[in-house]
Amino acid sequence: MKLNAVYPGTFDPITNGHQDLVRRAARMFERVYIAIAANPNKTPLFPLAERVDLARRVLHDLPNVEVLGYSNLTVEFAREHGVGVILRGLRAVSDFEFEFQLANMTRHLDRDIETVFLTPQEQFTFISSTLVREVALLGGDVREFVHPIVEAALKKRRRA
């Protein structure tokens, strides 16, 4: 029996590293929800609706992947969508401590929801949305880090 999974994050913007994890998860899970957080504690470059639209366009070819925005607890999102697994990416050992805390908090809030970690392919281990935004906004080339749709959105944002 395959389970459903949710991959939460701000995805500001979605990178090739995110895309790699989603595509691999789509082979492992019956349904994968990409839950894009409104996250009022951060000041995203792209508004929530645009981040959702970019992710939908980048992942449009995956029939078992659904991209949704949300503003509540990830555990609540998971419950609302009948999800038993929260998917998280680990790029480096430095990510582990924070992700470990999140996984333990999730377990505390709902013992029926498991956290599963995936590591990206080696060429994506250093990519983060933060670095991609910074490079793009300073006029650098981000072609190898993001889908062409995202690259165009970043260039448009830079000109604005």
Image (tube, rainbow, N blue to C red):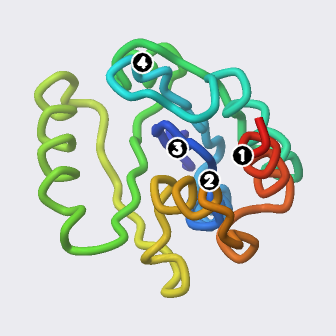
Residues packed near mark 1 inside 10 Å, few (<14), some (14 to 19) or many (20 plus)? few
Counting residues from the start of the chain, the first of labels 2 and 4 encountered is: 4
Residues packed near mark 4 inside 10 Å, few (<14), some (14 to 19) or many (20 plus)? some
Is residue 68 placed above or below 86 in the rendered structure? above
Judge from the rendering whether residue 57 lies leftward or rightward of residue 144; answer left or right: right
SS state under label 1: helix
Q: CA distance from mark 3 to mark 2?
A: 39 Å
Counting residues from the start of the chain, the first of labels 2 and 1 encountered is: 2
Asked if marks 3 and 2 touch (Cβ < 8 Å), the reply is no
- Give the residue type at disc 3: Leu
How many labels sit on residues?
4
Task: Give the labeled residue for mark 4.
Answer: 79
Task: Give the labeled residue for mark 3.
Answer: 3
Q: CA distance from mark 1 to mark 3?
A: 40 Å
Q: Quadrant of residue 101?
A: top left
Most extreme residue toward the bottom is 122
Task: Give the labeled residue for mark 1.
Answer: 158
Q: CA distance from mark 4 to mark 1?
A: 38 Å
Counting residues from the start of the chain, the first of labels 3 and 4 encountered is: 3
Counting residues from the start of the chain, the first of labels 4 and 1 encountered is: 4
- Give the residue type at disc 2: Leu
Asked if marks 2 and 1 touch (Cβ < 8 Å), the reply is yes
Counting residues from the start of the chain, the first of labels 1 and 3 encountered is: 3
